[in-house]
């Protein structure tokens, strides 16, 4: 009995020593210091760490992670770090945060399930609510040098209007867009200079788009159409205004296509916009750094391009020039500013009606 007791006591002491040794090697402060050095992030422990040793070694805490410029912030995240006793096993890192802020864009109720081994992080699951929608992704990242990463996944029902507003890129009142992607992929290097320039990606995208017109515009277009017999030289303006309003104004449309990210640019060549009344196609390129757009929209009537619109300038308020078949009778191919087109139609109508009455 005494020998059995001594054996049990020795075994218990050995196990305790093993736990202490593993805990020392599994030093959270040491891991945090290493991560801060590799990532240039600040990692703050909000509570005392809670340890468990069975059936594996595990610690829990609440942390805040942010960069020096407060562009990237993970707030009050519950973190669970665990590791099997086998020395070669990976470290499992599960994180849940009410809010992750990335350059103003808010990801809410975020969960990240990942593992760390041989200086590589594997993201088994990244899920979050994202501006009225949600995102689901997986990926991997090396902690070496420039920290190259790959990310694949999907998102659903995300409001582009809110996204652009949160990122302080643009505030759109005249167009409402919600978008989804059944699959996307990104790759780049987290620490490489000029992150946007080196980001690459492809996004299969679809969603809904709603162009908003004012009561004044609708009334003016209707009046112009009714009185056009008296003002034949305004027929092209009337036809173009009415075409846009009848086919796309205040009518839900769907869109689908592909976005490509490369060399600091987001581009598409195959975006199709359709509804029960009309069809349009979009080809465009947007500079990620400057938010400058250069694009073209073709509006179709009976499978022919009836109206063409080019978009140039800041994405917040680009210049939109229109031309095409609708103006062919005027023998004038010069594009017209669409904003002035609406104003010109109403003001010219009033001026010329006054002259007709005289």
Image (cartoon, grey):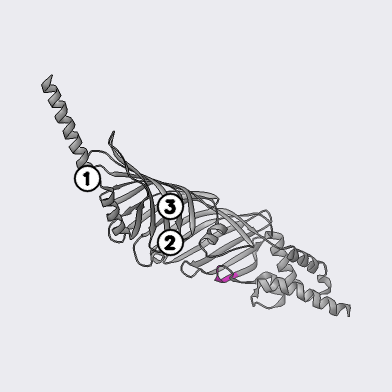
Q: Position of residue 276 (x, y in %)?
A: 67, 53
Q: Where is residue 51 in the image (x, y as percent from the top left)?
A: 30, 40
Q: Could you tell me if the residues under marks 3 and 1 are in contact, i.e. CB atoms within 8 Å?
A: no
Please tell me whether mark 3 sits on a helix, a strand or a loop: strand
How far is mark 2 from mark 3, CA to CA?
12 Å
Foreground residue among 76 and 115? 76
Q: Which residue is identified by label 1?
A: 24
Please tell me whether mark 1 sits on a helix, a strand or a loop: helix
Identify the disc placed on residue 71.
Answer: 2
Q: Which residue is identified by label 3?
A: 75
Residue drawn at x 63%, y 62% is 173
Left or right: 319 in relation to 28 = right
Foreground label between 1 and 2: 1
Left or right: 218 in relation to 102 = right
How far is mark 1 from mark 2, CA to CA?
33 Å
Q: Which comes sooner in the sequence, label 1 or label 2?
A: 1
Q: Which comes sooner in the sequence, label 3 or label 1?
A: 1
Look at the image and give the residue range highlighted in magenta.
310-315
Does the magenta-highlighted stretch encompass residue 264? Answer: no
Residue that sits furthest to the top in the current view? 1
Foreground residue among 354 and 116? 116
Q: Can residue 236 be seen in this view?
A: no
């Amino acid at each position: 009995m005494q020998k059995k007791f001594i054996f049990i006591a020795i075994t218990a002491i050995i196990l305790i020593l093993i736990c202490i040794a593993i805990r020392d090697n599994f030093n959270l402060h040491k891991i945090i210091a290493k991560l801060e050095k590799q990532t240039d992030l600040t990692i703050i422990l909000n509570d005392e760490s809670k340890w468990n040793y069975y059936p594996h070694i595990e610690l829990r805490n609440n942390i805040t992670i942010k960069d020096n410029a407060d562009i990237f912030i993970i707030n009050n995240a519950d973190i669970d770090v665990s590791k099997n006793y086998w020395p070669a096993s990976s470290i499992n890192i599960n994180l849940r945060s009410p809010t992750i802020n990335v350059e103003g864009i808010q990801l809410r109720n975020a969960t990240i399930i990942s593992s760390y081994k041989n200086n590589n992080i594997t993201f088994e699951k990244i899920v979050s609510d994202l501006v009225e929608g949600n995102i689901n992704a997986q990926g991997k990242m090396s902690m070496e040098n420039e920290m190259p990463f790959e990310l694949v996944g999907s998102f659903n029902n995300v409001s582009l209007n809110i996204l652009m507003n949160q990122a302080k890129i643009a505030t759109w009142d005249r167009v409402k867009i919600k978008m989804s992607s059944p699959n996307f992929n990104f790759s780049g290097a987290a620490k490489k200079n000029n992150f946007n320039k080196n980001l690459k990606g492809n996004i299969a995208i679809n969603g809904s788009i709603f162009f908003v017109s004012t009561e004044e515009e609708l009334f003016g277009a209707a009046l112009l159409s009714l009185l056009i017999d008296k003002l034949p030289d305004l027929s092209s303006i009337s036809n173009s205004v009415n075409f846009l309003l009848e086919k796309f104004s205040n009518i839900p449309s769907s869109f689908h296509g592909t976005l490509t990210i490369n060399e600091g640019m987001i581009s598409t060549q195959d975006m199709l916009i359709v509804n029960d009344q009309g069809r349009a196609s979009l080809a465009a390129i947007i500079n990620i750094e400057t938010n400058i757009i250069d694009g073209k929209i073709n509006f179709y009537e009976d499978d022919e391009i009836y109206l063409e619109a080019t978009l140039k300038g800041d994405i917040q308020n680009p210049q939109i020039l229109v031309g095409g078949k609708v103006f062919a009778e005027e023998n004038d191919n010069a594009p017209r500013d669409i904003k002035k087109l609406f104003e010109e139609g109403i003001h010219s109508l009033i001026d010329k009606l006054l002259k007709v009455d005289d």
